[in-house]
Amino acid sequence: MNSHVASNPVSLSYIAALRGVKPRVPGEAFQYADVTCVDPELLTCLAASNPEGRFYGVVTDVAAKNNAVEQAQLRNIDNVTFLTAAEAEQALPNLNYLSCDETATPLSTDARNKLFDMAAKKLLPGGLFHYNYRAYEHKDGALRFLIRELAPEMNGEQAQEFLTELKKLGATHFAANPESLTKLEECIRAQTPDDFFSLYDEGTAPSGTFDTIVALNPRGFSYAGDGNIAANYVDLSAPVESHDLIDKCRSHVLYEQIKDLVLDRTTRSDIWCRQPVQQTAAVSELFGLFSYGIPMQREEVPMEMIAKGKIINLASPLYSRLIELMTLMPISVGDFLSHPTGQDHNPDEVVEAIHVLVACGLAHPMRGVREVSDVTTVMQPRLLGAFNQYLDKMPINGSDMWMSSPVLGGAISVSARDALVMQALGRAGLANSVSVLLPELERLAKNPAQAAKVMDTAEPTAEMAQNMIQDVVGKSIVRWYAYGLLEAA
């Protein structure tokens, strides 16, 4: 069971909170728009997971709109609206969240300016703009841009020092481009920086990062973090040899472009905040309203994480206690501090450890409202929520399925194996689930490629179906209840 956190409103608020932006209180009404909605089912699932929100998806044409509307109606989700681009400007209301992903299909300059104008017009103060885009056309784009911007203003001594700095800042890039590294080292030894700079003289050297900053700052936006949570922490995302140097560059006007070089990236996932915005330094106000959970089995969580050479020991008492509870159900900071295993820990220490677990992609911030159902019986569980109840009517063909989690506030991807068992439990209860599951497995067996994703043997049997149910229920049932996918009938 994996969560989909991209453009999740809870995650966006959490990331902005890392920079002191006071998050929206869970349960408060909000408006959310995805202006490049390529997966209407996922947006519908997001709407089902956040019933206090109103969601808008801008799709390519009328046919795509009609199909998306039909699918939402089949799932009985009424807080999502689909629009064509021609309708969007007039139909979109004031927004708390705006999402655009143009990495696959870049916008024209004119269309991008219209997007930024719309963001400035539609986003309310404190609203968040999640913008995914291609920052550089080529792998050496960040390096080329920095050389073209900085080298012409340097004297000989500064240029020589710049070469040494580039070697540290571009460690990841040069490791993947040994010929460039060899030339760089030759120029450092020979003290001929211009020979290295001349390699990057030809052609243009645009930076989408620079252009975005120049466009959004005057429109009343401030940068509020990276959608890739780990990228907000230099020590978890950047090579060790670059840490001291990039830390010294934090006040540099081209800091974000320098970070692009350090992270060796051509695409970015920016979060921008519409000014004015409420800010606070109080940790309890920033992070106390979220819950945090790890939607995987306890045994699947590693004992340590290695991030760019930094080893994080997850077997330490604090981490292991947090992980033990978070893999059972989402918990808040207060929940942990009041639990017997957490009472001896300092609150700031706990918050810092949770930040690390989130940055490592293990834990996820959640809505802070835990709608945990009664798990005293699993004899007759039922699918919870209109989106998930549609699973009862769907043929499962071996692919993962989106399910709605009002606890996470986002979509959870469930394996076909788990979905089949969940479907059988919802239709017939635990006692009669084999009689429902077996015909589905026999149907799948007619397609060996699909069956291989679910079954260990080619020919399903009642015994195999029973073992599958016992295995899946034993591993997953508690988390299904905890994340609001099932409830007791």
Image (cartoon, rainbow, N blue to C red):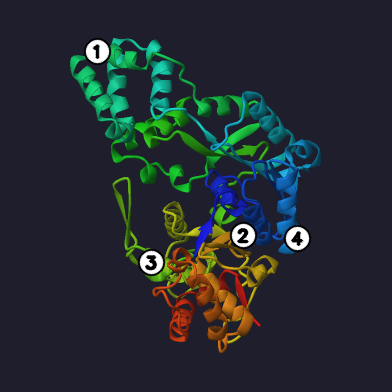
Left or right of 76, for residue 102: left
SS for callout 3: helix
Q: Is residue 256 above or below residue 17?
A: above
Q: Nearer the viewer, residue 144 or 425?
A: 425
Q: Nearer the viewer, residue 253 or 145?
A: 145
Residue 150 image position (x, y, % from top left): 41, 17
Which residue is tagged 3? 300
What is the residue that sits farthest to the front in this orientation?
Answer: 446
Q: CA distance from mark 1 to mark 2?
A: 55 Å
Q: CA distance from mark 2 to mark 3?
A: 23 Å
Q: Earlier in the sequence, mark 1 or mark 2?
A: 1
Q: CA distance from mark 2 to mark 4?
A: 20 Å
Q: What is the crowding at mark 1: few (fewer than 14 residues within 10 Å), some, or many (at least 20)?
A: some
Q: CA distance from mark 1 to mark 4?
A: 67 Å
What is the residue that sits farthest to the left in this orientation?
Answer: 189
- The residue positioned 52% from the left and 25% from the top of the image is 210
Residue type, numbered disc 2: Gly
Which of the 4 image quadrants contains residue 247?
A: top left
What is the residue that sits farthest to the right in this orientation?
Answer: 90
Which residue is tagged 2? 409
Q: Earlier in the sequence, mark 2 or mark 3?
A: 3
Which residue is tagged 1? 192
